[in-house]
Amino acid sequence: MVERTEEITALIGSRGPLPDIDELLSGPAKEGPLTVAELSELVGVSGHTLRYYERIGLVTVDRDGAGHRRYGPRAIARVIFLTRLRLSGMPIADITEYVSLIDGGEATVPARLALLTAHRARTAAHIEELKYSLAVIDYKIATYGGELGDCTPTSDSTKD
C-alpha cells in the first residue's frame, strides 16, 4: 500500500494534467483496486463523500465478493477528476449534468465543452478576485511593517 500511495500521490500532486487510465493501470492500480479508505486518504476526501458520489451516480464502483467497494483505474480517475471540479467550485448539480452528458456519448461533446467553458470562465474570474484580495492583504501586511509570508501578529495589531 505504501508504494501505491506514493505513486498515486505523485500523480495527483503533480498539478499537471490528470493521470490517464494507462498511467493508472501501469502504476498505482496494477496491484489491484483501492478500498474506500485507501482512495479517501489519497485524494483527501472522506469515505462518506466517495459513497455519496457513488450513490448519486457520479462514479461506478466495483464490489468484491464480500460486497466491499473496490476502486479500479477508471473509478480512481473519475474520483480524481470529480475532486478537481469540486475544488474549483463547480456545484454538484453541474458535475452531475456533466457526468450525465459523458454517459450520453460523443453526441454530447459540444454540451460538455459549453459546460466546462462556462465553468472555466467563472473559475478564472474567481482567481482574479482572489489575486486582488491577496494584493489587499499584502498591502495591509506591508502597512503593519510585516513581510510577505510573515503571519505573526505585530505589537500594534489595532490598525485597520
Image (spheres, rainbow, N blue to C red):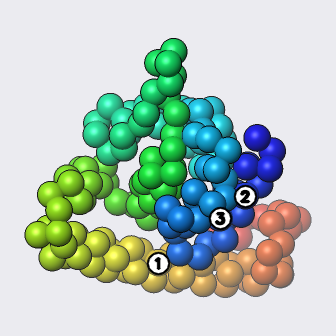
* Residue 27 image position (x, y, % from top left): 66, 58
User: Residue 11, labelled with which disc?
Assistant: 3
**Residue 156 can be seen in this image:** no
Out of 141 and 3, give the one closest to the viewer. 3
Mark 3 touches mark 2? (CB < 8 Å): yes
Residue 43 is left or right of residue 143, and the answer is: left
Mark 1 vs mark 3: in front: 3
Mark 1 sits on what residue?
Answer: 127
Mark 2 sits on what residue?
Answer: 7
Q: Amino acid at mark 1?
A: Ile
Q: Amino acid at mark 2?
A: Glu
**Residue 50 can be seen in this image:** yes
Neighbours of disc 2 within 10 Å: few (<14), some (14-19), many (20+): some
Identify which residue is drawn at 56% across, 33% down.
Answer: 36
Out of 27 and 53, give the one closest to the viewer. 27
Residue 149 is left or right of residue 111, and the answer is: right
Out of 42 and 151, give the one closest to the viewer. 42
Residue 128 is left or right of residue 56, and the answer is: right
Residue 148 is left or right of residue 55, and the answer is: right
Q: Amino acid at mark 3?
A: Leu
Q: Secondary structure at mark 2?
A: helix
- Relative to 50, say whether 88 is above or below: below
Q: Earlier in the sequence, mark 1 or mark 2?
A: 2
Q: Secondary structure at mark 3?
A: helix
Q: Earlier in the sequence, mark 1 or mark 3?
A: 3
Kindly report the distance in space between the C-alpha atoms of the residues bearing marks 1 and 3. Answer: 24 Å
Residue 104: quadrant of the picture: bottom left
